[in-house]
Image: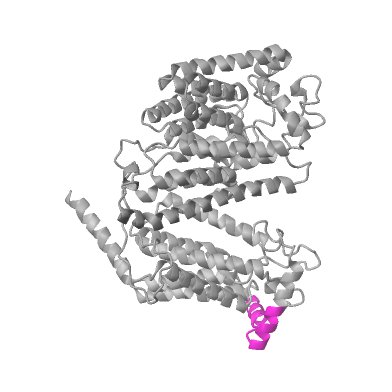
Amino acid sequence: MANVEHSGRPADTFGRAPAEARLLAARLALWAVAATLAVRQLAVVATTPSGERLTDLETWVGPHGVLHVKGSIYDSTRFAGTPFGGLVLKPLTRSAQAALGWGWTFGTLSLVVALGLVAARALPQPVGRRTSLLAAPVAISLLMLSLPVRNALWLGQTSIIPVLLVLLGCFTVRSERESGLCIGLAAALQPTMLLFAPLLWFTGRRRATAATAGTFAACTALAWAALPHDSYTYWVHHMAGTGLGGKADALGNQSLHGALLRLGLTGPLEITSFLALSAAVTALALRRAVHYAHDGQLLLAVAVTGCAVVAVSPTAWQHQLLWVLLAMVGRVGRRASDRYVWPVAMVLVTTLPAKMLLPNMTVMHPLRDNLVLLAALAAATAIPFVSRTSPHYQRPIPAEYAPPVAPRFRHVSLAPFLRRVLTRPNLLLELLLIRVVYAAYQQVRLAATGGTMSGGRARAEHHGHIVLDIERFLHIDIEHWANHAVVKIGWLRSFFDFYYESFHFVAPLTVLAVLYWRRPVDYRWARASLGFATFLALIGFWLFPLAPPRLMPGLGVIDTVHGVQDFSKPDYGTLTALTNQYAAMPSLHFGWALWCGVVIAVIAPRWWMKALGLLHPLLTVSAIVATGNHWVLDAVGGAVVVSAGFGLSYVFQGPRAKTVTAVAGAAQAAQKVSVGSM
């Protein structure tokens, strides 16, 4: 790389100038993002009332904290660290007390920056110039976004220190004794960090192993000498801290011990199961970690060991789970399109609440309650990370692209890198992103009226009168007439109620599933169009909250789906806990139905299929008006955002043409022939 970049040829130099400028701009932008996220974290702490921020720091500086308690440090408010941690951190927190926590917050941010820099430098070689320049700001930004760091800053925790000490011991210090000293100090603060000692031993760093054990023993003995009663309480009475702090079966404890307790196991059976599972996880994780270390992926080996630490710790609270994020450095999959699945999944698991990743279904609760633990177990014991000796490590199987189609306009497409891929995308990644986008969609809908369904009632009803006046001017105010006409016919009312409740999600998901399986190129086109339309609709919900006809007092529209509403109650519009009842303009009930109809009409090979597809938006618009859930203009708004969605897909990705689909079909047919001839 160095020889190529400094070859001295003028043509090469001038040819690379634009690329170097773009790389510099990208690097500066990423550092700006990292700085913005750091400032944002400071702002969150600053704007939170003093009694609600840095609550764990109160275990030190509060009136009943470690700094003021005269007896055992475990008599203070919820302190659960090691005696050595109490001995060392007690004087350090006096400065935090004097600065009301600000010194602690700035110090934590500095530790996060140092952690990101060390992790970026520890990436397995060889690393390209672009990766080496962009890795540090990306790593720091991801750390700032992660729940462990956000919780550590919010609570005033010290959980970043042991992780940073381990990384410093493995990647920064030169001598083995200094390496063992760093890891031994980390183990003195979190005893399960001793799991890194076998990793050092089996990778040939015997002096570092001895230094780790010696440092841990010396620090623990020092704490015994200075705090004998507290040391007995921690190591003997509470069995290495088990039971200190919060309840072990709380959702925040993402360890095997916490999961077994949540599953209902207690007593000797739970302890035996925990010890047996911990031994199995430790053995398998260390075996994998040693393999990856010998393979030249030491950062991955350290992350795998750290994930095992998370699983086998008696308590692994959310602010201690940085190892799961570091496991994203492993490469998974032979195809280029599969490489994004693992890192994206790890970023989402460590940055978003579990309820955003998995639906709120009873059958999903065991998975949702232990999602971070499952991710740590997968990284430690199951995920087949690609070896550096594999030909697919540096050069994964590339994606197949269709030849570009000539657009009708000069500047289309605006994003030429979004080319038409012939193969279908990774299913796991698609499902994960669909779930996350839908959860964000729900949150934006809910926040559009100030975070409550009834918060924007007056504004929504005012907008309802505006829409009604416009419809009366246009002579299309048919909502009351259609509603009462349908109510008089029992079977028709039941049909429209059923249609309204049943096909809103089923139809789009079915269309996407069929396209994913049978027409992957068209799937990407349709998915992008639907995404653009939904995004535009969210803007409409935010800017123009609108009461539907059924929630307009005095209009006389009957709510056939939800039942009679008591307009005398302030929160009568709060019908469910998950939806904003005033997100009516534009109507995505009709918009998504129209999207289904257009996609089916464009792609379906038979005329009757096209007609059946177009029948769905017709029945939907009839249902939303007849049941009193939308105005006629809401359907017009839905049609506008769907049209804009298809238009934006065209502008950014270029035209969707028959030649693209034909090429995809020919490629798949050729692949089948080649497989059959083998």
Residue 103 visible in the picture: yes
Residue 256 visible in the picture: no
Q: Residue furthest left?
A: 677
User: Where is the N terminus found, in terms of image quarters?
Assistant: top left
Image: 293 above or below 512: above
Q: Position of residue 486 (x, y in %)?
A: 62, 77
Image: 579 above or below 302: below
Magenta run includes residue 345:
no
Identify which residue is drawn at 60% across, 48% down: 35
Magenta run includes residue 487:
yes
The residue nearer to you, when weighing 489 against 506, is 506
Image: 492 above or below 571: below
Q: Position of residue 552 (x, y in %)?
A: 73, 73
Q: Could you say which quadrant of the image residue 108 lies in?
A: top right
| Residue 447 located left or right of residue 639 | right
Coloring applied to the structure: one colour
The magenta segment is: 466-488
The residue nearer to you, when weighing 493 against 640, is 640
Q: Position of residue 329 (x, y in %)?
A: 45, 39
Image: 126 above or below 446: above
Q: Position of residue 212 (x, y in %)?
A: 53, 18
How many circles with numbers are drawn on the protein? Answer: 0
The residue nearer to you, when weighing 579 against 33, is 33
- Give the dominant element type of the magenta stretch: helix, strand or loop: helix
